[in-house]
Amino acid sequence: MNQHLVRAGRIDITRLANGLTVATERMPEIATATLGVWVGTGSRHEQAHEHGLSHLIEHMAFKGTARRNARQIAEDIENVGGDINAATSVEYTSYTARMLGENVDVALDVLGDILINSVFDPAELAREKGVILQEYASVEDTPDDLIYDAFMESAYAGQAIGRPILGTPDTIKAFDEATIRAFLAREYVPAKMVIAAAGDVEHARIVDAAERHFGAMPATAEREPEAGRYTGGERRISRKLEQANLVLGLPGLSFKDPGYYAVHLFAHILGGGLTSRLWHEVREVRGLAYSIDAFHWPFSDCGLFGVGAGTAGADVAELMKVTLGCMREAAEDISDVEMVRAKAQMKVALLTALETPGGRIERIARQLLSWGRIVPSEEIVAKVDALTAGEIHAAGRSLLLGAPTMAAIGPIKGLPSVTKIAAGLRP
């Protein structure tokens, strides 16, 4: 391991009396400050009638509070040269801002206001529902996006973790202020929230501002989501399209599982770059796809491994045959060169994410919510470096024993059945 690649800064952490965590990392070479509030709640925490609510709440956070209308929220941030954003995922929702270090109080004032004092005006709510319905329609019209939603729904059938983040037209239209406030009271609790800041920041100043704007939130017990249960299955959507989009999946591992890094490395070797098995064989040698990649999506209690590609309808069967062959071979025969290359790719991806304040606060927040501590980069890099070819082979073989998930859209007449695909994964 090249130790000089890992620059561990000082991270100060304070927990407020109500359970909210504040963490900062001062970066003397940075003149700006990036900070945000992470909530350990996402789409998997929604009940059936709340499907899509996390995403709607993220949108509505910028639509007006008791003190500010939507325009004033934007103006207060942009008047000091800043910007503000938010994002929703399966397990987290984040609200972030960036500005000069001298203006962090403005950012925390706005973030506290939108998270605690939003008014959910009926007119704004109706407008934003319309925006999200357009977003939903856009996904429906984009096959390479739609197929991943279908893939998740098939892999985790009948569960919140498998449902699309956007919701459905029926659930979106049904949301009202009472539903929103009930969800916020249950899920946006201090014990599940982290304020993280990096760049030109002073820890004491951030803690003081956090106490002013968030300290009055009542301490409330956390509610654990339903455990993710991989089911496997298939979803075939026949459409008259120029290309077929396919996603083949298998049960993966949680990021808390000891075998997580081995599975992740297997995914890199199989389809993580221009020198990967799949890219070389499928694209370069046979010309069966413009792009193909392997991925591993880890969650807090489960995970999902997969391969995604697009191809002509006439090549669907051949693409699947070659893909299955590459997967079997990778599980049995990995070269030293591939090991070294994949480890380097993983370390570069890890360390590159830490080169910006935004990347640092995301790491800080996610690790504190997941582990209750900051996991040093050296610790992660050491685990990657310690992996052996035998461990990667074992991870690959274990993956291939799982029940497959198959999602496909477009001209897919030649696609084998999921039963034949499962047989093709066996040695």
Image: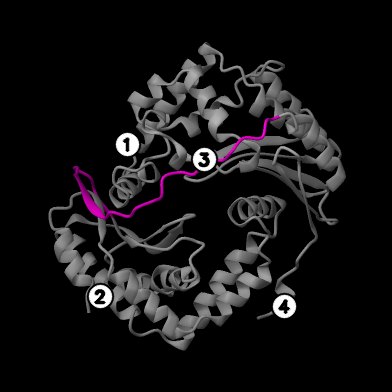
Label 2, label 1: how many angstroms apart (C-alpha)? 32 Å
Alpha carbon separation for disc pair 3 and 4: 40 Å
Residue at disc 1, secondary structure: helix
Which tag, 2 or 4, sits closer to the chain's start?
A: 4
Q: Which mark is residue 332?
A: none
Does 234 appear in magenta? Answer: yes
Dot 2 or dot 1, earlier in sequence: 1
Rounded to the nearest angstrom, the CA distance separating label 1 from label 3 is 32 Å
For the magenta stretch, what is the residue range? 217-246
Where is residue 150? Give x, y as percent.
30, 45
Sequence-earlier tag: 3 or 2: 3
Q: Amino acid at mark 1?
A: Glu
Q: CA distance from mark 3 to mark 2?
A: 43 Å
Q: Is residue 284 visible?
A: no
- State the residue position of label 3: 223
Foreground disc of the pair 2, 4: 4
- Is residue 89 at all visible to an observer of this figure? yes
Residue drawn at 62 percent across, 56 percent down: 367
In the rendered structure, does residue 125 fall within the stretch colored magenta? no
- Residue 3, label in figure: 4
Name the residue beneath numbered marker 1: 140
Q: Quadrant of the N terminus?
A: bottom right
Badge number at residue 325: 2
Front label number (3 vs 2): 3
- Comparing marks 3 and 4, which lies closer to the viewer? 3
SS category of the residue bearing label 2? helix
Image marks 2 and 4: residues in contact by CB distance under 8 Å:
no
Q: Pinpoint residue 100: horizontal percent, then vertical percent.
A: 81, 41
